[in-house]
Image (tube, rainbow, N blue to C red):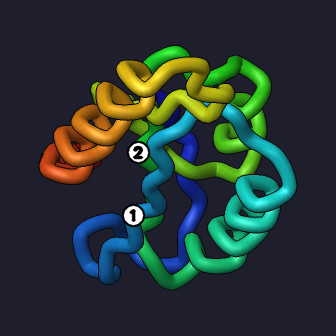
Amino acid sequence: MSDKVTSAAPLGTRPRLVFVWNYLDWGGAQIYLIAIMKEAREEWDVSVALPHGSSQEILNFIEQAGVRYEFIDASLDSGPATSIGLKIRRQFQRIRDSELPIPSPV
């Protein structure tokens, strides 16, 4: 977990902004969100919740942005579903993941 945070106001006095994604793949959308986080952290207490197993590369980008992160026990498999059983299992997993509470950054 990253504790590097730069801000104009002390933590706890600013509103919280939590970014959450539940898949291990990352690309342009996450890089765009990290750019938003960099700007928002001056006025917001920004953190990220992402799945265990996320790549060290994306974690490095988040740390370089000066944003804290926590891991969640939820991730979607974005590969092709090769059977009806896998499709059904993924739907149950998606439903289960959407019911998980978002962790509070420490």
Between residue 50 and residue 104, name the one nearer to us: 50
Query: How would you rate the neighbour count of disc 1 (Cα within 10 Å): few for under 14, some for 14-19, many for 20 or more?
Result: some
- Marks 1/2 in contact by CB < 8 Å: the verdict is yes
Residue shown at the point (66%, 27%) measured from the top left: 79
Q: Quadrant of residue 34?
A: bottom right
In the visual, does 36 lie left or right of 16?
right
Q: CA–CA distance between discs 1 and 2? A: 7 Å
Q: Quadrant of the C terminus?
A: top left
* Residue under label 1: 18
Identify which amino acid the numbered label 2 is placed on: Ala
Identify which amino acid the numbered label 1 is placed on: Val
In the visual, does 21 lie left or right of 25?
left
Q: Where residue 12 appears, x then y in whole percent?
A: 24, 69
Q: Secondary structure at mark 1?
A: strand
Relative to 36, say whether 66 is above or below: above
Relative to 9, say whether 93 is above or below: above
In the visual, does 105 lie left or right of 85?
left
Residue shown at the point (60%, 78%) measured from the top left: 40
Residue shown at the point (57%, 71%) measured from the top left: 41
Between residue 48 and residue 27, name the one nearer to us: 27
* Residue under label 2: 49
Q: Where residue 35 appears, x then y in whole percent?
A: 78, 67
Between residue 101 and residue 86, name the one nearer to us: 86
Between residue 37 and residue 11, name the one nearer to us: 37
Q: Where residue 74 appears, x then y in whole percent?
A: 33, 32
